[in-house]
Image: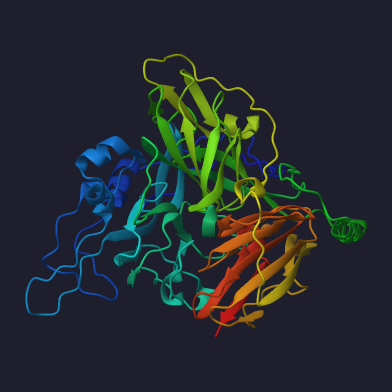
Amino acid sequence: MLHAMERPGCLSSSKRRRGRTLRCVYRATQVGEDALRLAHGKAGELFGDFVPTHCAPPPNPQRMRPDMSFDRRRLLQLGAAAAVSAGVAPLVACSSRRVEPTADYTIRIATGPIELAPGVIVTTTTYNGQFPGPLLRFREGRPVVVDIRNDTATPEQLHWHGQKISVDYDGAAEEGTPYVPAHGARRIRFTPGPAGHRFYHTHLRAGANLAAGQYSGEVGPVYIDPRNEPGRYDREVFLTLKEFLPSLSQGGDMAMDFLAGEEEPTLKSTGEAAMNASLAQGKPHGYEVGYQFFAINGRMLGHGEPIRVKAGERVLFHVLNGSAGEIRSLALPGHAFQVVAMDGNPVATPTEVPVLWIGTAERVSAIVQMDHPGVWVLGDLSDDDRGHGMGVVVEYAGASGTPQWAKPPSAKWDYAAFGDSTPKTYAPDETFDMTFAKNNAALNGFNQWTINGVAFSDKAMDPMFKLHQSRRYRLRMKNASDDIHPIHLHRHTFELTRIAGKATSGVLKDVVMLGGYQTAEVDFVADDLGLALFHCHQQLHMDFGFMALFDCV
Ligand SMILES: [Cu+2]
């Protein structure tokens, strides 16, 4: 059994979204033994719904690389196709009897300790006893078998974010995906796609339980290798950004105004009137979530292995914001990011920017030309967040000294900058208008969120919109709140067609940040039959109403 961590009562009730203190020190008992058990798993445990084969090939060490860094030249030496696709084992046929294929990957959900820095150990639920979960490399179009084992007492949902797969496997109870039973297992088979940087995460709702859902460590990256990879880079590095030890506060949220474009005056007046009426009734601001510790690839700044580079290299960073609700920024002093893909999809116009802004669940792939030797901090623009761990050291070969940080030039984040220089225009078959609004502190101090006046109901589970397969739909979204919402649609990729009033095309995503009192329009083709969940990816928002179902018939 794992022993509970000692948790001094030092989380301030006034903490806001960004963590402040490092005064808490957590001590674990039996950490070594339990961590070892979690990392390697127990052989011979029963699986829920399949029979393991006896003619399985040995595990391939190339499948899981804990440093999340890949030297492309070495991969090419090894034979890129073989090495990159090593995560895809062949199906095994060893006799005339029916034989189950070996799983390409086994994901084990369990609660245990992870060490973010020396003396900073937190207990959380993870995949395979590590944070982030192992990088899963798939090959576009090649079927895979994944075993999901749940060693917790809670039924689980593992969502394959950004992939177009059936509701049986997508990992959302609202769509009808079966749960992975508590202390049970589920084997799934699907064909990965589309190619690019995807990820997997729990899709449980947490409500007020800040140990559940994405407040936990249940996040891991996926990379689906495309059939054709241009590969104009030397090395690729996967970074998963995440906060730990959440707590609630009611101080109101920090304004973030990095998004390009203007607010809509009518949305602003509506939202502000509703908020002022609520405050006038004596209600405080609804709860927000703040965090104690910040980490990249599970290590706080200065406590993980540096990213070691050589002058002249082109390093491709695949950055995933694995947060439950935070928006992250990332800068590397003296360097620029050439954004080549967003949410795993190549952008129409690769563009250099000084800072990456990454909404909850978004991914950005960007190449950095390493032409400024030294030892640098690749970190969040917020001094507070960086000071509490949100960064990683980049160290050039031959350089030494204290890692340096410098504030980058300010720049707005404009999705349209990565789109077609002359936007294409489309004629959707149908347009849905969606207005998002907040009822301040309406649910026992939590904000209630509505789409067109309706908060998602577990009881009703009525699809809000009906789709017909292969038709093109436009979502015309209006945000009548001051929060930024990272809007996500399951099982589909959408194209931005208008962002804060500006027409665009050529930016394909599965999450888009919708700015406070701003508007956005996205188009998608109804790819697949069945239900598709639409929601804000802020755990706190989706759990309190900000969800809807599309039903494709
Ligand atoms: Cu939201």
Residue 366 in picture, x, y percent from top left: 50, 40
Q: Residue at x 54, y 27 (%)?
A: 335
Going by the image, does 56 lie left or right of 413? left
248 or 522: nearer the eye? Answer: 522
Toward the viewer: 548 or 432?
Answer: 432
Choose between 125 and 340: the one closer to the eye: 340
Residue at 61% in and 35% down: 355
Q: Residue at x 65, y 67 (%)?
A: 426
Render colour scheme: rainbow
Residue 439 position (above or below residue 178): above
Q: Which residue of the protein is positioned furthest toward the bottom in this rendering?
A: 553
Q: Against 98, is 492 above or below? A: above
Residue 253, image x, y percentages: 74, 47
Percent across and percent down for residue 174 are: 54, 75
Q: Along the horizontal axis of the image, is 325 left or right of 53?
A: right
Specify whether 459 is left or right of 253: left
Question: Which corner quadrant of the figure contains ligand 1?
Answer: bottom right
Is the C terminus in the top left, top right, bottom left or bottom right quadrant?
Answer: bottom right
Q: Is residue 211 visible?
A: no
Residue 495: x percent and y percent?
A: 60, 61
Residue drawn at (34%, 59%) of the image = 107
Residue at the extreme front: 422
Residue situated in front as seen by the camera: 333 or 185: 333
